Image: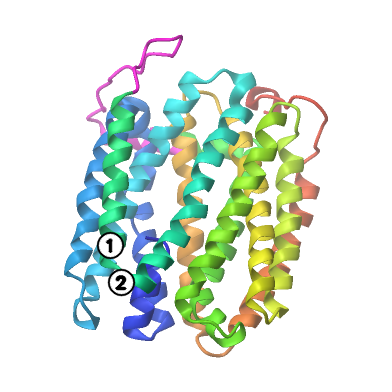
Amino acid sequence: MEVTLPVWVGLVTKSSSQVAGVAAAELLPAILVGPLSGVIAERFNPKIIMVLTDLFRAFAVLLLLEFHGAGTAYLAYIVSFLLSFGTRLFIPAQSVLVRKTIRDKDIQKAQGVLHVASSVSLALGPALGGTLILSMGPIPTVITDSGTFILSTLLLLDIRQGTDGLAVCKKLTLPSSETSIKADVMVAFHYLLESRRLVVVAVVTAILTLVGFIWFTVDVFYVGTYLGVPGEAVGYLWAASGLGDLLAGLLIVPRAGKLNSAYLVIGGLLVRTMALFSYSVIGDFWYALWICLLAGFGDGMASIGLSTMAMQHSSPGVIGRVSSTLDIVGQFSGIGATALIAAIGSSSTPRQDLQACGVLLSATIVFVLSWTRPTSGHERTHDDDV
């Protein structure tokens, strides 16, 4: 759907603003449910939350079957919003489930394995979406996407909590006091700000989201203007990026526990920056494929490093709220990118937009180097950091 929806809307409306608008609708749920999603994930059974949100998204995406042209473009906004609404609840629940069932020494390995699984989807999904659009149109992609949520639900139902040494996730009651809910939400913000490492995670997450959103928004038009291929071919570039993401995970997992997460973040940012600058000046589609592979590899390194740092420097009792807070940071960064794109409009070219993102990533590397002091071996816990 990451390929199908923006390409579909872009081809129908011929407007980058409409593409950005669909993406903006995806960001709004962070404002509405983001602050509470972490509290909910910690106080209810995370497995049940994940199952319900998967079923919700499976049915929500089918609304696109009625999207036939510019007159029904509002459906793209609605579906984008609903899918994101479910995701905002799913992400912290997943973090809670992982944190409660994985030993501290295995966190980096667990994050690497999860990243590999996600990267397989990022590698196959865009290629499948682009191929289906070119050969059969967007409807088969809608049906396929709905089916993946059903499959995810079935797999989640097979999880047996409380067996094989896994921690039992108790069902708790959400407090009726509005003040206590607000207090729980604020705890995550204070907790995050107390750790330099978590501050770095939040800032880098925001920057990577901003850069990724801008690249995502202009790419449909960039490939046609500078690479001389149809806009639908952007799916293959995103598939190459997903493959690079996968390769990063496959290389890191066997070495999990021996790598410093801060070094992974710095290395990933450096690779992504070089790839972005190269992509902004290249004019050949086949070279662009290899550059996107490199960009995905950098994203994979940074993502695993960031998720591991977030887990290692957060206690199990607040990981749901920390996870949702970091998700909110990323979503607000995306909203900022939307406003930036709308403000810039046609005053800059897609190539200039990408080069500006490269400069921003370069500044981010300097920030991470100045705010972290990577050490060899295993990293400290959050309590040590405080």
Number of disc labels: 2
Circle 1 residue = 140
Instruction: State left or right for residue 73 relative to residue 185.
Output: left
Residue 49, position as x, y percentages in the image: 29, 33
Write the start and end of the magenta stretch as one range: 159-186
* In magenta segment, residue 169: yes
Q: Dot 2 lies on which element?
A: loop
The C terminus lies in which quarter of the figure?
A: top right
Q: Dot 1 lies on which element?
A: helix
Residue depicted at x 42% and y 34%: 94
Residue depicted at x 48% and y 67%: 235
Q: Quadrant of residue 293?
A: bottom right
Q: Quadrant of residue 10?
A: bottom left
In the depicted structure, whether residue 127 falls above or below residue 381: below
* Amino acid on which the number 1 mark rests in the picture: Pro
Residue 178, position as x, y percentages in the image: 27, 36
Residue depicted at x 56% and y 40%: 116
* Amino acid on which the number 2 mark rests in the picture: Gly
Real-space CA distance between mark 1 and mark 2, rounded to the nearest whole angstrom: 7 Å
Q: Compare residues 13 and 370 and report the one nearer the observer.
A: 13
In the depicted structure, whether residue 103 falls above or below residue 251: above
Circle 2 residue = 137
Q: Compare residues 128 and 80 and report the one nearer the observer.
A: 128
